[in-house]
Structure formats: C-alpha cells, structure tokens
C-alpha cells in the first residue's frame, strides 16, 4: 500500500507540473501538490488542519497561507485547468453542463452565505451557492468552474464585502444565469471544445440566458417550467385594426400562446431508453414538437399587456416518468433530430450532479472553513484540479484495459474541431450500452 501511495503521489506531481509553472512563488509551488494530495488522500475531513496532520506537516500555517491568506492570482491555474480538461474530454461530442450546487453553512460570516434555496437539500437553507460549469464526454465529467453567487444581502453591504475580500469585479449584483454566461465566455475564449450546452429549468426559464446561448451560435437544451408559453410554428402574424389612436406598428400573433404542458398533451408519446446504468435501463416516455418560444418583444395584445411575440423556433420536449412526474425542455437542435437523440441529449445533464457529489463526498468541496472569497474559490479550484487528475488516471487505466476502470464511450484523444454551434452540431444516438456510473468511492481505485 505504501508503494501504491507513493506511485500516485509521484504521478500527481508530474501531472501538476504545468500548474506549478504558473505559480511564481516557490512556497506556493511546494504547497499546491500537498493541498491537492490532501484532498485526494484518505480521511473524512478535508479542511486545512486535518489535512496538514495527515500529510505529516509540522503545522497547518503553510497550507492555510497558500489557500486563504496569501495574495496571488488564481486565473493562470484556472486557465490551465481549462486546457487540461479540454485535452481529457473536449471535442464536438462533449457537453458543457451549467448548474449550481449549495454548500450548507452555519453563521453569517462566510462569504455569500445567506438563507436561500439549496438544490442539494431541496429547500431553503442557510448556505453558499456555487454556479458550476462542467465539461463531459460520454459519462466522464470534468468540472471547469465554480463561481460564488452573492445574494442581495451581500451585494448591498459594503462592509461585508470588504471583510470577505470580495474583488471589485464581482461585487455587482448578478443573477445565476449572468454568472453562468460570464463563465461560459471564459471557457469559449480558452478554446475549450464542446458541442452542446445543457442546463436545468433554473437557467432555462430565463429568456435572456437562452438568447445569450443562441447569440453565441451555440447548440443548447435546457429545462423549462410547464407553464412556459409557446406558439405553434405555423402561427401567423396579423395587423389588427386599431379601435382608436395611431395604427399599430407591430404585427401580433393571430393565435394566443399556450403553456408547454398543454401543447404536448394531444400528441403521441413514445417510450425511450436513453442509457443503461448499473441498475438497468433508464427509460421514460417522451414527446417532442417544433414550436416558437413566446419570448420575443413584449407587446399589448387583445387588451393584455406584456404579451410576448413569437421568438426562436426550437424543439419542445416533454418527459413522462414512471412515477407520473412530468418535465419539459426546450432545445435548438436541428429540426430533423430524432426523438431518441433529443432524449439522450437532455438526460446527459446528470453527469454534473455526479461530479458535484464526488467533489463534496470524496474531495471535500464543502469542507472549507475559511470565510473569504479568495479562500473559497482557491479551495474549489484545488478540488477541481484534484478531480481532473483522478479522471486522467481513470481514462489512462481504461485505455490500458485495466479491470475496474470503466471504459469511456468516447476515445480519450482530443478531437480537432472547434467548439460546436447550432449550425454544425449534429447530435448522435447513444450507443447500446454506455459506461457504468461511477461508484461513490471511485477515487480509491484511481489512487491505488
């Protein structure tokens, strides 16, 4: 076991070299591998003090200064993470998954903590919320970004912002979709390759978010609420005569918009199996129809204000689960996309949930005990670097055909094309049997 531990630590040091070259100070270059090794290694608690003890350090001051107290820019390491993730899983058949995850916290001093909806708990709780961006190919996720969302209670309190050392660039109030788009732009600028952006209804409900994706020429598939209004593609625009005053300047739809749930109620549904997991086939009933989303400019129609004109033509997809629960989605994939491919694309989002779970349960994402903005984001960055290293070892083992590694559905060689977009992205039907889901403690294999 000692030899095995020494082997993965040596492999980690070699894999981290490009990251270490981006750290100017020798003390930081010494602390970074120790911190990442502490996250990967055994132990239930991945905060500074217990990690320092397990690493055999004389004290925890060095680790604490590196992650929380020191003054250094994390941007070069973030850029290196994007490059390494792209090399691991980037390509035109990769997905970029946007989501968020909550870190439950006590007290009021930790940066960004406030009573807010915690997706992890499914209810409002005192927590921090991190907007996440994950690159995934096949069933291999690699987190790219974790950026803290600041509630209004923080953006409106200069004293709290100062105390938590929040940079000036991040103090303005921003919605989660706005944070996601900013991180997406950073990913695109870095040249990370992917074919389609996926997000849940927390982001898909935002017309501005969907519009921003389309404006960037990206293919996307997002969740929406059942009440999202849409028009059938054949909707005609008419010029109703004005009863008084000036003539109308804008044509209006000849038919009213309808809730997504109602539109799909009268069309056939089909049973689709989109993946085979460790517990058998994953399947549900799906229906899809081309529609125009009611997210165009707001006008007055029939005496009602704030009625939206027809916008982009997209797929409206419904999912009917065995439990009776129904979910709805929009996707701007090509009009000839098969229903099975639509379903598989939409359901590919699950890998980010798996990544969040692994980051917390195995790598201690939610174990950080500091209160500052730099400390939290550096800790989150180290967990993502650790996660990427483990995926590197896993893919390398799969390439060697080692038992227990799990073989990816896609190859590990980077593709040559640029990031996919609406005009070039052609989703493919899933293979008959996909790679099994990662076990909760999969990291133990990667480090032995």
Image: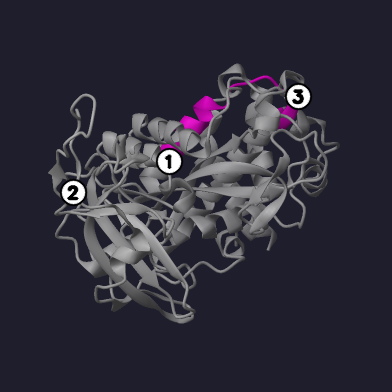
Q: Residue at x 62, y 29 (%)?
A: 29
Mark whose residue sits in front, 2 or 1? 2
- Determine which residue is flagged by label 2: 254
The Cα atoms of the two marked residues, 2 and 3, are separated by: 52 Å
Please provide percent x and percent y for residue 87.
Answer: 37, 44
Quadrant of residue 431 within the rendered picture = bottom left
Report helix, strand or loop for mark 1: helix
Quadrant of residue 209 within the rendered picture = top left
**Is residue 61 shown left or right of residue 138?**
right
The Cα atoms of the two marked residues, 1 and 3, are separated by: 35 Å
Please provide percent x and percent y for residue 229.
Answer: 34, 52
Which label number is shown at residue 160?
3
Residue 346 visible? The answer is no
Please report the bounds of the magenta region as a residue range. Answer: 66-82
Q: Residues within 10 Å of mark 3 (few under 14, many from 20)?
A: some
Report helix, strand or loop for mark 3: helix
- Determine which residue is flagged by label 1: 84
> In which quadrant of the rendered image does the N terminus lie?
bottom right
Which residue is at the front of the view, 96 or 292? 292
Q: Residue 78: within the magenta? A: yes
Which residue is at the front of the view, 432 or 37? 432
């Amino acid at each position: 076991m000692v030899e095995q531990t020494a082997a993965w630590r040596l492999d980690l040091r070699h894999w981290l070299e490009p990251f270490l070259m981006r750290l100017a100070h020798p003390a930081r270059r010494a602390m970074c591998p120790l911190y990442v090794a502490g996250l990967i290694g055994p132990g239930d608690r991945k905060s500074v003090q217990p990690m320092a003890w397990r690493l055999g350090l004389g004290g925890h001051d060095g680790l604490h200064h590196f992650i929380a107290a020191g003054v250094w820019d994390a941007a070069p390491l973030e850029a290196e993470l994007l490059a390494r993730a792209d090399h691991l899983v980037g390509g035109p058949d990769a997905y970029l998954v946007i989501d968020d995850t909550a870190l439950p916290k006590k007290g009021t001093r930790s940066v960004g903590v406030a009573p807010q909806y915690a997706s992890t708990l499914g209810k409002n709780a005192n927590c921090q919320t991190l907007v996440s961006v994950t690159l995934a190919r096949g069933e291999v996720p690699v987190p790219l970004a974790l950026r803290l969302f600041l509630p209004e209670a923080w953006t409106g309190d200069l004293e709290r912002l100062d105390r938590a050392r929040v940079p000036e660039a991040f103090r303005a109030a921003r919605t989660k979709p706005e944070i996601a788009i900013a991180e997406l732009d950073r990913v695109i600028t870095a040249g990370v390759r992917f074919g389609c952006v996926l997000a849940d209804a927390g982001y898909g409900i935002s017309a501005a978010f969907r519009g921003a994706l389309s404006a960037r020429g990206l293919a996307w598939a997002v969740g929406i609420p059942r009440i999202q209004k849409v028009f059938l593609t054949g909707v005609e625009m008419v010029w109703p005569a004005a009863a008084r005053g000036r003539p109308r300047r804008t044509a209006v739809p000849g038919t009213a918009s309808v809730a997504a749930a109602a539109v799909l109620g009268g069309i056939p549904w089909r049973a689709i199996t989109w993946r085979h997991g460790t517990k058998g086939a994953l399947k549900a009933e799906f229906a899809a129809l081309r529609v125009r989303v009611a997210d165009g400019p707001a006008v007055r129609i029939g005496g009602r204000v704030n009625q939206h004109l027809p916008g982009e033509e997209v797929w409206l997809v419904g999912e009917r689960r065995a439990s009776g629960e129904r979910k709805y989605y929009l996707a701007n994939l090509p009009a000839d996309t098969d229903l099975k491919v639509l379903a598989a694309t939409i359901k590919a989002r699950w890998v980010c949930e798996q990544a969040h779970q692994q980051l917390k349960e195995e790598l201690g994402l939610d174990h950080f005990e500091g209160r500052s903005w730099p400390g939290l984001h550096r800790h989150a960055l180290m967990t993502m670097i650790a996660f990427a290293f483990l995926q590197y070892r896993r893919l390398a083992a799969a390439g060697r055909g080692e038992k227990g590694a799990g073989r990816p559905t896609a190859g590990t060689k980077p593709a040559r094309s640029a990031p996919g977009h609406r005009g070039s992205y052609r989703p493919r039907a899933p293979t008959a049997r996909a790679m099994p889901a990662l076990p909760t403690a999969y990291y133990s294999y990667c480090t032995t």
